[in-house]
Amino acid sequence: MEKSIEISNLSFGFDAKKKILKNINLTVPKGSIYGFLGANGAGKSTTMRLIMGLYDDENSSIKIFDNPIADYFPKGLGNIGSLIDYPAFYDHLSGYDNLKIVCEIRNLDYTKINDTLQIVGLTEAKDVKMKKYSLGMKQRLAIGLALISDPELLILDEPVNGLDPNGMVEVRELLVKLNQEKGTTIFISSHLLQEIDKMVTHLGIIANGEMKFEGSREELNQLFSFQKTKFVMKNAEKYMSELENAELKNNSEITITTNSSTEIASINKKLVDKGAEIYQISPVGGLEEWFMEITKQN
C-alpha cells in the first residue's frame, strides 16, 4: 500500500509535563479520503500543523510520501495543498486577482488560475470582488488556493466549519470530485460527523490526544457488526419481559440488539402476537453513534 502520510509513535506538547498528543499512529493511503475526527480540542489541528512543518517533529515521527518532513520540506510544499487556518483574502480584489497574487508569490503559471476557478465552481464569479462573496464562495476559493499548485495531497482542517447546508454540500461534492477525477489524496479533519460520513474511505478518531480508532470504513463497520433496531410502540414497558438484549428508552420506544433482518421480523411478529401496537421500526447506529461509543472508551 502506497502511503501519502505515515505517523509513528508521535507525542507532542508545548510543555514537557503535559502532552497534547500521546503516541499517535496514523496511516493515510494514497488516493484515499481520510477523515480525521475528534471533538474540539482533541488534537486534530495540532497534528495537522505538525504534518505541515509548522511545529517541530523532534523525533522524526512523520513521513510524507515516505520522506521525513525535515527532508521533504520546503522543496515538497508544491506537492501539498493545505488549509490549516482560514486564509486572509484581499477583499477589495476579485477572486481571480487573489489567486494571481498567490501565483506571483509561488512562481506559478497564470494559466492555472482559470483551471482552478473552474474546479471550485467560481468561474462566473472570478471578476467579483471578494467582499461580495458568500461564506461558501470564500471557502471554495480557499480550497482553490490549496489546489492551485495541482498537489497530490490536500490537507484540510475543518473546511466546512461555519458553512450553511448548501455550502457544506458544495465543498463535499468538490472534494469527492477531486478525489475521483484527479486521484487527489485528501486528509480532512472535522467534528461534523454527518458531513464526513458521506465522503470518507478511511477514518481516524482521536480523543484527548490519543487515537481511539484507525482504519477503513469497512473495518469500522466490522467493529460494529451488530445492529441496534428501534421499535416505537404503545406501552413499550409492558413488553420488556418478552425480549432479550432490549433497552427501554421511554414508554414508547425500545432498542434491541439484532443481527439480521430475519431476527427483526421475528421480534416484530412476537410483539404483534402479544398485542403490541407498533408504529415504527428503524435501524439505530452509524458514524455518529459509533464515534460516541469509541471516544468514551478508556
Image: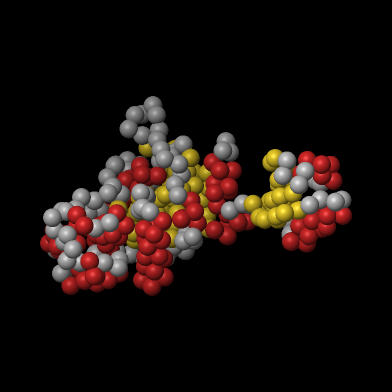
Query: With respect to residue 182, does 40 lie above or below?
Result: above
**Residue 73, percent across and down?**
25, 53
Closer-to-camera residue (278/35): 278
Q: Horizontal placement of 267 versus 25: left or right?
A: right
Closer-to-camera residue (184/29): 184
Residue 80 visible, this orientation: no
**Residue 251, percent across and down?**
73, 41
Residue 55 visible, this orientation: yes
> What is the basis of the colouring in this image?
secondary structure
Q: Horizontal placement of 270 versus 155: left or right?
A: right
**Residue 87, percent across and down?**
24, 51
Q: Residue placed at 78% from the left, 60% from the top?
A: 265
Q: Quadrant of the C terminus?
A: top right
Q: Residue placed at 74% from the left, 61% from the top?
A: 261
Q: Residue placed at 34% from the left, 61% from the top?
A: 153
Query: With respect to residue 8, does 20 lie above or below?
Result: above
Say which quarter of the image contains residue 218.
bottom right
Q: Residue placed at 28% from the left, 47% from the top?
A: 85
Q: Horizontal placement of 92 versus 68: left or right?
A: left
Say which quarter of the image contains residue 292.
top right
Closer-to-camera residue (228/273): 273
**Residue 129, percent across and down?**
17, 59
User: In the orientation shown, which residue stands out farthest toward the top?
Assistant: 17
